[in-house]
Amino acid sequence: MLREPSRVEKRREAISAYLMGEDLAPKQIETVLQLVDLYGLLHLVRPKCRDARAIHQQAEAAALTQWKKTWHALRNVALQERKIHSGTAAEFARKKVSAQMYQRVRGSAVIPRYPNPEDRSDASTGRHAEIEVTRFLQVGARYLKEKCDHAPDHYEECLAGVRLRAEGNLHPSKSKVRKMKDRVHTRLMEAPALEDFDYCIAIGQDPGEEWLPMPLQCRVHTGSG
């Protein structure tokens, strides 16, 4: 006996079919679906038993460890340059741990930014937090622009279609799409700038050399010991 697809599965299938019609490759469709999951458009996420202080402490511990490693690796580099690169490496470690451990704090509950499947429930009820919707749209817009060569008009309409289907409107009318597209456009225009680091972390891309500890960028050769 075949099991009836859940509400979440139906919405996911509708989003996938819609994106296929927008000429996205299977890998690109999977990335967009991962963003839908990441920002909770289909699932409610159960809070982890962590608070903001614990996350801060873990991020600071990672930063200190990375600072020490970089400081030791650059022992033959000029003091001022050594301090600068050690500080950059520490900040990279601090920000990476913070980004991976939570998305935002709601009261005493910390919502993990990368929830495991067992930490999700098969329903998404009520309105989503504004910051999560905005971040999904920002990351999605940049991904569709850079990786799928979508013009602004195209990716705004595409994101509108995804949002409508995630909300349960599996076959939205043209008027519904137009209204949602206008809302997407307004939200993107009014949102604070998306940091490159946050975008790269969201799509699983290397943040780039400017965030890498100095020993990983290049080896500094000096004439003096």
Image (cartoon, helix red, strand yellow):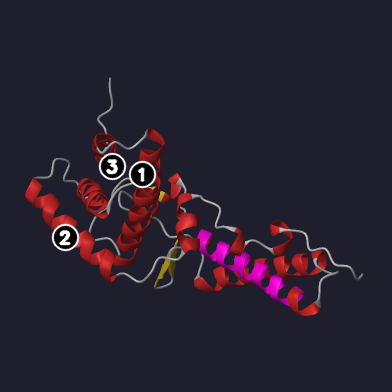
Mark 3, residue position: 8
What residue is at 69 percent from the left and 58 percent from the top? 217
What is the CA distance from the residue labelled 1 to the residue labelled 3? 26 Å
Q: Which residues are magenta?
A: 82-100
Query: What amino acid is labelled 2 in the image?
Result: Asp
Q: Secondary structure at mark 3?
A: helix
Q: Nearer the viewer, residue 15 or 108?
A: 15
Residue 43 - label: none
Is residue 83 found inside the magenta-colored segment of the image? yes
Mark 2–mark 3 distance (CA, rounded to whole Å): 25 Å
Q: Which mark is residue 182?
A: 2
| 139 left or right, relative to 156 | right
Q: Residue furthest top?
A: 1
Q: Nearer the viewer, mark 2 or mark 3?
A: 2
From the viewer's perspective, is the residue at label 2 or at label 1 nearer? Answer: 1
Q: Residue at x 70, y 71 (%)?
A: 85
Q: Could you tell me the amino acid type at mark 1?
A: Cys
Split into 4 quadrants, where in the image is the C terminus? bottom right
Q: Is residue 75 left or right of residue 8?
A: right
| Side of 119 relative to 60 (left or right) | left
Label 3, residues with CA under 10 Å away: few <14, some 14-19, many ≥20: some
Whether residue 49 is visible = no
| Residue farthest toward the right in the current orientation of the protein | 225
- Label whose residue precedes the other's in the sequence (2 or 1): 1
Inspect this view and state whether residue 27 appears.
yes
Q: Residue furthest bottom?
A: 80
Above or below for 29 versus 188: above
Instruction: Relative to 192, say whether 128 is above or below.
Output: above
Badge 2 density bin: few <14, some 14–19, many ≥20, Cα 10 Å: some
Residue bearing the label numbered 1: 148
In the image, residue 11 lies at what x, y percent? 25, 41
